[in-house]
Amino acid sequence: MRTSHSEIRRKIVNEKGNITDEELFASQAFGAYLADLAENASKRYKKPIRVKTIWDLSPDAMIACTNNRAILVNTGNRIAMSFPTTALKADSLVGSLAHEVGHINYTDFQVLGTHNKALLEGRFYPKKPRDLTPLEEKALYELEEYFEEQNPDALKMVAHLAHDLVNITEDSYVNARMCQDFPGKFKSGIRLNQVRKMDYSESITAQIGAGAEPYAIVRNLIFQYSTAGEINNLDEYTGEYLDAFYSCAPLVDECKYDDDAKARSAAANHMLLKLWKYVKPLIEKAKEEGFQDANEEIEKHFERGAANAPTGRTRPPKSTGYSPPDEEEEREELEAAKSAVDYETERIELIKTEEVGDGTGGGVYKNNNYGGAGYENCGSDIERLLDSIAEERVNVRQEQELSDELQDEANRILYGNNHKGIKVTVNRMAEVPEELIREYGRVCPPLLLLSKRMQKQVRQVLKDQRQGGKLSGLMMGRRFVPRSLVHDDGRHFSSTRLPIDSCELAVGLLVDESGSMGGLDRITTARAASIVLYDFCRALEIPVMVMGHTASNMEVELFSYADFDSVDKKDCYRIMDMTDRWSNRDGAALRYVAERLSKRPEQMKILILISDGQPADVGYVGTAAEADLRGIRKEYTRKGVTLFAAAIGDDKENIERIYQEGFLDITDLNKLPMNLTRLIARYVK
């Protein structure tokens, strides 16, 4: 299969327009992109982060979450997918990632956990609320009665409601920290999501009409205000829920930018008392119906952020120069994000209050001079990812076509009477699993170092071959050199060597994958040798193919790990799939690889077989099978293919008897990669 680079590029360009949201955002490439962003944002705090993505379009599916070590992002979440363009969707997903990175970087999980545990045990943390109004004093007294009663369902409800309020203000804190410390794409994404969450926020009147619990209504107003600095009062509601929210707003303002996490725990405790009118009925309901049932009833009315704040034991780093954001600047940034969405969607803007106050004198102002959040490459990032995914799709298609061609070639080969009626199947992975790539990265460094050492020994020879030049001091040649007569050694001739475009050598490696190769690390050694040999040949631009073979009941399985016509440059990872399997019908596999080599244009062709013993398949054993192998070797030697058989294990005598002068005695398995590479190097020279 021969495909030009320009043809591949044309296919990639055409493929980009066919990539769906799912193919982009659920791809390994986009997951790796998010992982890189997270790593860059957390490395200053020396906190390693793993990022995993899922694709779930369910309306109630989670957006993102973290356990303080890893982040899970739903790239199909309703917030991100609500945006009309690929770039805005990507911005939103980066914003969700940024929020979770913020929790890992800045949330004091120990304080969060201690606060929750204290309430479950019937006590306050960090301290009992003070400076209370008479109504709040009464609420405190009644709450402490629940503490003394020690009803587990009641205490679970108290702790749950307080924990939820802490999470709301904690979300605002980590967003503000991330926007200050990472003012580029993270800040843009966070602001964009803040605007979209307000779009999804229901007005007070709408919540009342939907039958929302009174507590949920006030709690949602606190959420809206803490998230975006405003609330949705589309219908200009005036009444007790708005009054209750106004009473809590100063506590939100005091704690949501405080570096001390205890401030948010203390504010949540105080808000419980301010909202006691709505909290107490929920505690009673939990006592009567059980916490689980009571909680399900109220939580279905809660507006949600990216995720509940996680739990953990690690304290965040101390703040270095952090200060609360300028309110006017933050408002301008939110308006800019809103303008970007307005421009894309032409949606009808909701009328919302700007700040907590008496409901008069507010307004929304658009800053036409705003220059952006400071990151100009988000579009190019997505273009790069689209290019990568399109290239991957084209490569997969090309690899599938290559696999079909390999099978067609297998079907055309005449295997001889000894293999009449057998079935030959060529297996080649069109897509390489991520785990093989990871495993290769784990084991390859010492093997590639071995390859590089061997490359140095032959690289100059290849360079001289490709550049050409004058050879002097020859015993024979076209040109006599008189001045050399002073040397009485007979070397008086010179010759001009013409440059060559490429190395006139092609290599095929065939590995026995029979079950017995699993013993004594034989297949592991063969795999290592394949990695070294493949890297050596690729680095020196020597065409190389690597195949494995096994058989069962007259069915031969060939495994194409590396091929001359591979497109996606992932053959080194495919080699990691090499393993011991069933029996071995060497003759059919040997003929297939030899036939492919014989058609190569290179002058020299080397075929290396790694095996641990004699052929063994149904009807293919003993002297007849050995005679078949000797016949194949002689046949393809006449066609210019030089065969070497490397014996692994205790069957060296059998292998030498079969392949005779083409036998390689590999006594020390640890030297197999080096010995095979030296063999190729000898033919290069």
Image (cartoon, rainbow, N blue to C red):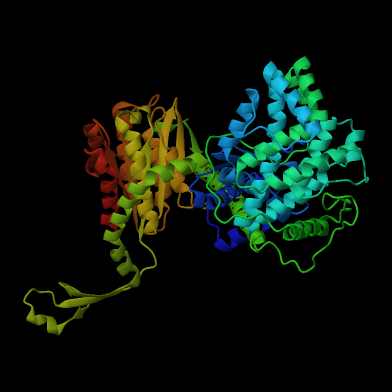
Out of 433 and 533, give the one closest to the viewer: 433
Find residue 284 and report its image quarter. top right
x, y percentage for residue 52?
59, 40
Q: Residue at x 32, y 38 (%)?
A: 525
Residue 379 relative to residue 442: left or right: right
Residue 567 spot, x, y in % from top left = 52, 53
Q: Quadrant of residue 585?
A: top left
Q: Quadrant of the C terminus?
A: bottom left
Residue furthest toward the left?
Answer: 488
- Picture layout, residue 517 above or below residue 391: above
622 vs 663: above or below? above
The residue depicted at 62 percent of the width and 39 percent of the height is: 262
Q: Position of residue 11 (x, y in %)?
A: 63, 57
**Hey, which residue is sitting farthest bottom in the picture?**
482
Observer-nearest residue: 277 or 461?
277
Q: Quadrant of residue 164?
A: top right
Residue 83: x %, y % from top left = 77, 50
Residue 233 left/right relative to 452: right
Report the front residue among 100 and 558.
Answer: 100
Whether residue 301 is visible to the viewer of this picture, yes or no, is no
Picture layout, residue 155 above or below residue 245: above
Q: Can residue 420 be seen in this snapshot?
A: yes
Number of numbered discs present?
A: 0
**Relative to residue 674, is residue 130 drawn left or right?**
right
Nearest the viewer among 262 and 176 is: 262
Residue at the image position 46 percent from the left and 34 percent from the top: 557
